[in-house]
Image (cartoon, rainbow, N blue to C red):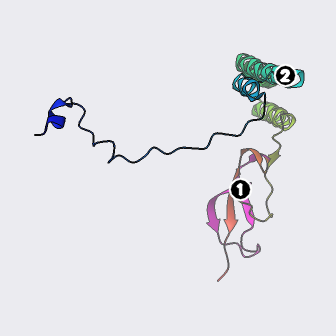
Amino acid sequence: MSDQEQTRPAEDRSPPESEQPPPERTPAPQTAPGAPEAAEHQAAPAPRSPEVEELEDRWRRALADLDNLRKRYARELPREREAERAKVAAAFLPVVDNLDLALAHAGPDDPGAIVSGVRAVRDQAVEVLRNLGYPRYEETGVPFHPEQHEVVSVVDEADAPAGTVVQVLRPGYGEPGHQLRPAAVAVSRKQE
């Protein structure tokens, strides 16, 4: 080993300066007289205009309002659901009352009275459903519509074209797109 290598510390084993590449130098930006003041001014954050501050304040207030609205709806949703359930149950209370009256007035010697009473109560229940937005439909002779009908059986019917509802086994309630239950129907098949 040479004297130079022995005098160099162990952790500094970098190549001699002549072998290292020269550091890259970037040209300094040209500044005009009074530039040190401009450089200091750029380093500090620029003061915001009152318009920007007002917009930021309005934005923060809108976010806070939206958050408060979400929280209020989350609190009110269970109350609204309960109120709607109570409204629907209240609409059916007269139906239940009339069923009680029909049963109370029906005598063992007049079975026709109970049938007519129950029929009247059924009509009242159908009216309640119609008022709630679910009208009853049980038409026969109409073309099968998959949004309104559920096919339960397919039958041979000489008088009806193929795909026609020939019998309603269970009525449907509602309108297409806003349906409580589709009608269960028997549909005619294609004649061969």
Picture coordinates of residue 155, whole percent (x, y): 64, 68
**Left or right, 18 with reference to 67:** left
Q: Element type at marker 2? A: helix
Crowd band around label 2 with a 10 angstrom C-alpha radius: few (<14), some (14–19), many (20+):
few
* Location of residue 147 with respect to 126 vertically, above or below: below
Residue 23 in view here: yes
The magenta-colored residue range is 147-174
Q: What number is the disc on residue 94?
A: none
Which kind of residue does numbered mark 2 sit on? Arg
Which of marks 2 and 1 precedes in the sequence? 2
Picture coordinates of residue 94, whole percent (x, y): 82, 22
> Image quadrant for the C terminus?
bottom right
Q: Residue at x 80, y 63 (%)?
A: 142
| Front residue (pair 105, 7) | 7
| Front residue (pair 106, 13) | 13
Quadrant in which residue 58 is drawn: top right
Q: Residue at x 71, y 56 (%)?
A: 149
Q: Residue at x 18, y 36 (%)?
A: 4
Which residue corresponds to mark 2?
Answer: 58
Which residue corresponds to mark 1?
Answer: 149
* Location of residue 21 with respect to 124 vertically, above or below: below
